[in-house]
Image: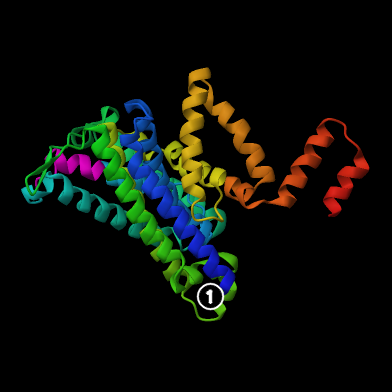
Amino acid sequence: MSVADRVTESRTTLLALGLFLAMLALPVTGLLSTFHLGLVISAMVLALFALSFNLLFGYTGLLSFGHAAYFGTGAYTLALALDGKLGFLPGVFETFVPALLLSVGVAGLVALVFGYLCVQRGDIYFAILTLALSMMLYETMYTWNDFTGGSDGITVLVEPIELGGLTVNLIDTGTFYYLALLVLAASGLVLWRLVNSPYGELLLSIRENPERAKMVGIPVKRYQLSAFVIAGLFAGLAGTLFAVRTFIVTPHTLHWSMSAEPVMMTLLGGPSAFFGPIIGAVVFVGLEQVLSNVTEYWQFGLGLIIVPVVLFFPDGIAGLVRGDDSALADARAYLDDIRGGDEPGIEENHHE
């Protein structure tokens, strides 16, 4: 590792630690109401969802349009276990922690099966396969009324947890805030170490040139499948948090529109930066809240914001923070062109 890389890693570590400490103190500062604290929780849950997606997209080069399959599987498994509908399992799985571990495991198992099928083909075929398999799962949950509740879904009620004489009530917003924060921090640390390890370097080499990676002896499909399963595990974990927070699980958690959310968050924040999806999740939740207060067609406004970001800032908001001069120059040239600006100046920017 070069000196510049060590400095960058040290700065990133200090920034992450400072942000974590600030987030720990946030509920006790009284700066946010219970409602706004709930929005922060939603952003953290979706940030974990987006981080899991970016392990596939940003680091392995696999665009999944069905990532909600594992998010929804985690949510549904938790709801079914807590509701006692998995009677073939020991009763211990009707309590939160065992049910959560079971949910993450089932999500990983589904990712293993789906991933094995999807990595057999690349490019657009991979994306379509992920979408098709996810929608098959959605249709199953939607129509299996006796087991899943159909369109009405399943209510999620978590009993208070007893930990050495301490009662933890996850229905309380403040308590759940700290659970979501600790899960996001721990998951982020695991994923950070993963992508900055030799394993992560291999994923990046596969992303850049899978054919060349295969030629030098790297088992490309095996590594793609492993990344697929790891991403599914963390997406399932995010789904369990989502289920507890919303108190209900419906087929929407498996719908293609849910799969689109981590894609948009990652593009907003920047797929080339590890913390890009987290930034994107915060911006996405904030924009959704602001725009939905202005108009019921808030998705249209969100689209108006995402389109120029994708066109001019492929590295997202993280690229802006780093200072993407070429993207800024292209954006200025485009705006000058719209306003009927000086053509020679525009060409000059492009030549630069």
**Quarter occupied by residue 146:** top left
Instruction: Give percent across and percent down for residue 288.
Output: 48, 29
> Which residue is rendered at x = 30% and y = 49% of the image?
182
Work out whether residue 124 or residue 340 is closer to the camera in this orientation and state it.
Answer: 340
Question: What's under tag 1, amino acid-wise?
Answer: Met
Q: Looking at the picture, does residue 307 appear above or below residue 151?
A: below
Q: In this view, does 325 lie above or below 284?
A: below
Q: Give the range drawn in magenta.
A: 76-87
84 drawn magenta = yes
| Residue 165 position in % (x across, y down) | 6, 45
- Is 215 inside the magenta-drawn segment? no
179 horizontally vs 204: left or right = left
Query: Where is residue 163 drawn, in percent x and y?
Result: 11, 48
Q: Quadrant of the C terminus?
A: bottom right
Please tell me which residue is depicted at 59% across the width and 75% down the height of the picture. 212
- In percent of width and height, residue 119 lies at 46, 62
Identify the residue position indicated by label 1 in the image.
Answer: 1
Left/right placement of residue 248 relative to residue 216 reads: left
Q: Is mark 1 on a helix, strand or loop?
A: loop
Instruction: Classify 83 as above or below 270.
Output: above
Q: Is 191 positioned to the left or the right of 155 in the image?
A: right
